[in-house]
Image (cartoon, grey):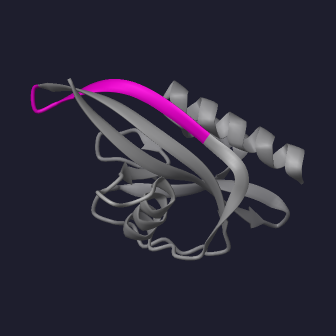
Amino acid sequence: MGTEKSAGIVLFRNNSGKNEFLLLNYPQGHWDFVKGKIEQNETSHEAAIRETREETGITNIEFIDGFEESVEYDFRFKKENIHKKVIFFLAKTDEKNIKLSHEHNDYLWLEYNDALKKTTFENAKNVLTKANEFLSSTS
């Protein structure tokens, strides 16, 4: 079984006093956060920043210290079983305009309850819930 390490960001912005989370629509049909493979000689933070820039065009992000969540799952790619670990960080942006990459079909900025409903996978819902609780406890 192959292994893959990725990094991602639960990205949010403040809109009229309410936090909105960014979800991306992947070609396979699911809604999830910005994420991608960690390249050689790259830290997980560097990978998360690069993936955010590549997938959304957003360059102005501020990491929220103290939040880091990992998810692990298995999938098949080109007839090979892959074990994937994704490290998610929490970050804030004040940028509203997204320059969507060819890797995604659409994006939405949603308040927590709507984002939770829209997020496809249970492990991503858990990360979103933990991120929202973390923000609530630190504000």
- Residue 59 at what x, y percent from top left? 52, 76
Q: Is residue 78 magenta?
A: yes
At a point 45% along the width and 40% down the height, the residue shown is 86
Q: Nearer the viewer, residue 27 or 69?
A: 69
Q: Is residue 136 left or right of residue 2?
A: right
Q: Residue furthest front?
A: 41
Q: Is residue 137 left or right of residue 81?
A: right
Vertical order, 88 against 20 (above or below): above
Image quarter hosting the C terminus: bottom right
* Span colored in magenta: 69-79
Image check: 6 left or right of 71? left
**In terms of image quadrants, where is residue 51?**
bottom left
Residue 68: which quarter of the image?
top right
Residue at x 66%, y 42% (from the top left corner): 114
Q: Residue at x 64, y 39 (%)?
A: 128
Looking at the picture, how far across and down is residue 123, in whole percent? 53, 28
Q: Nearer the viewer, residue 65 or 18?
A: 65
x, y percent for residue 80: 14, 26
Is residue 1 magenta-colored? Answer: no
Where residue 47 sits in the image (x, y, percent)? 42, 59
- Give whichever of 73, 45 is nearer the camera: 45
- Report the magenta stretch's main SS: strand
On the rendered structure, is 23 left or right of 82? right
